[in-house]
Amino acid sequence: MLLLTFAAASGFAKSRPIQVKVVVVTMFEVGADTGDAPGELQYWVERDHLDRVYPMPAGYHAVRMNGGGEMAVLTGQGTAHAAATVMAVGLDPRFDFSHAYWLIAGIAGGCPDQVSLGSAAWARWVVDGDLGYEIDAREIPPDWTTGHLPLRKSTPFEKSVEPLDGQVFALNPELAEWAFQLTRGIALEDSDKLRQARSQFDGAAAGRVPFVTMGDEISGSNYWHGKLLDAWAAQWVPYFTGGKGVFATAAMEDTGTLQSLQSLARAGRVDANRVLVLRTVSNYDRQPRGLSAADDLARQRIGAYAAYLPALEAAYRVGHAVVNELLTHWAQYGKAIPSAD
């Protein structure tokens, strides 16, 4: 009888889902997960010893964990890959995400009015930059500032604002502020190379040494570049956030990830209030003085960005401070979401 009871209990234990405490969401890797040139995943795998590999056939890449409840996900580039992978992970019955925190941590283009190369920005708002109408720049009316229009509107930034589902994501502002306060004093990498690169750009923050800040994001699979599109983005974010959002970074995947997390929250699989977005600046989103947007875009390649490695380091260094705090004090944070108060 005791043997049967033990066997039944053992079978139950084996079938129980693994409790995940923190999920780090990364978007691209340039080679293997370890041991070569790094992408967004590699530092997390190597430094946090994410040696437990769980195949994810319905997603882009296997997920990795350590024994402390930390998981890392690699979504693949673009909103479609991100949405599909996060949905596959979130629905996987092997894992319990009911109290998990989700940290999107990756590199981005940055607006030099708000951030400098190598800086890190915690977002309160993520706004989709793909949903909309577009007219070729050679055909826009002379009184328009952009050829990109909101859907169902006939002029740029037309009132009243009517965001579609998935157009705007408001993150938990108290959690974002807590993360910022926890990490704002972290020293980020600077170098002669970064100082020289920064000196070529105008913008209120362009010349600053790398720093941690609050700043909002445009997300979309269309990789845009140039001072005129930077000006569009600086209007697009406040337009869709009622003037509350301030454009700082441009990335590709996060509306896809957040759309899946929103759906998973409705299904009771995740807590949408436990989501953080951290983007670090590998390059500016517009050209330097004396160079055209087209010529500068030709130089923009993964691995060749002016602050590529410093931005990867910043994403890990700043993000890990939050992950470590959550895991170290899980008895507290597993029950109650932290705030800056």
Image (cartoon, rainbow, N blue to C red):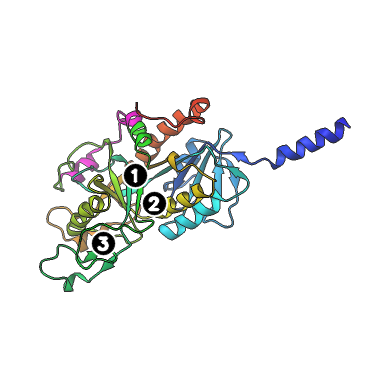
Residue shown at 73% from the left, 39% from the top: 12
Question: Which kind of residue does numbered mark 1 sit on?
Answer: Arg
Task: Please identify, in this view, whether the residue under mark 3 or under mark 1 is nearer the observer.
Answer: 1
Reading the image, the residue beneath label 3 is: 298
Cα distance between the residues tagged 1 and 2:
10 Å
Cα distance between the residues tagged 3 and 1:
23 Å
Question: Which kind of residue does numbered mark 2 sit on?
Answer: Asp
In this rendering, the answer to whether 259 lies above or below 273 is below
Give coordinates of residue 314: x percent, y percent: 35, 38
Are there few (<14), some (14-19), or many (20+) residues within 10 Å of tag 3? few
Cα distance between the residues tagged 2 and 3:
24 Å
Query: Which tag, 3 or 1, sits closer to the chain's start?
Result: 1
Q: Give the left or right position of residue 31, taking residue 14 as reference.
A: left
Query: Which tag, 2 or 3, sits closer to the chain's start?
Result: 2
Q: Residue 195's quadrant in the figure? A: top left
Q: Which mark is residue 254?
A: 2
